[in-house]
Amino acid sequence: MTSSKNILSNDVEIKGSIRFSNDLIIDGKIEGEVHSDGALTVGENALIKGEIKTRSVVLFGKVEGNITVAERCELKSNAILVGDIEAGTLSIEEGATFMGASKVGRRPDPKPAAARPAQP
């Protein structure tokens, strides 16, 4: 099974929701939601106005909206994020701009702890 990367170049502008399943590189302008179980790379020329919900995201460009990722969120040195982050892990390079709140860490396992046997 091969992993494919999809690319939206810097001359692409989309108004509406985007859904994808593998990896996506966006270097254009998106106004709407971005949803996926895959990884998202937001290029240097990209501007996304809307919510991002993916497995992971690497941000080089600008996002105006909240980011929710199951795994890792990386803000590179020229990145600009105006919105909140919820992620398993978060990496912010020196020079990045982040205006918002963050919730970082793994969510607890929803399975209840094993019941202990009753003491006589």
Image (spheres, grey):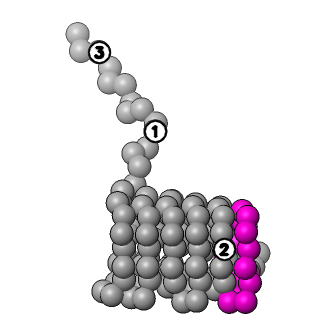
| Residues rendered magenta in the picture | 5-23
C-alpha separation, residue under disc 2 versus residue under disc 3: 58 Å
Residue, disc 2: 30
Horizontal side of 101 relative to 71 (left or right) equals left
Position of residue 15 relative to residue 97, above or below, is above
Mark closer to the observer (1, 2): 2
Badge 3 is on which residue? 118
- The residue under the point 36% across, 57% down is 103
Tell me the residue at 51%/69% (across/down): 64
Give the Cα separation between the discs numbered 1 and 2.
34 Å
Q: Disc 1 and disc 3: Cα gap in Å? A: 23 Å
Query: Is the Cβ of the residue at disc 2 closer than 8 Å to that at disc 3?
Result: no
Question: Where residue 38 appears, x then y in whole percent?
Answer: 64, 68
* Of the two numbered discs 2 and 3 in the rendering, the one whose residue sits closer to the viewer: 2
* Secondary structure state at the residue bearing disc 1: loop
Q: Are marks 1 and 3 in contact (CB under 8 Å)?
A: no
Left or right of residue 45: residue 83: left
Rendering coords of residue 16 (x, y %): 73, 64
Name the image quarter holding residue 14: bottom right
| Dot 1 and dot 2 residues touching (CB under 8 Å) | no
Local SS, label 2: strand
What amino acid is labelled 3 in the image? Ala
Q: Quadrant of the N terminus?
A: bottom right
Q: Earlier in the sequence, mark 2 or mark 3?
A: 2
Q: Say the numbered circle drawn on residue 110.
A: 1
- Residue type indicated by callout 2: Ile
Task: Write down the quadrant of residue 9 in the picture.
Answer: bottom right
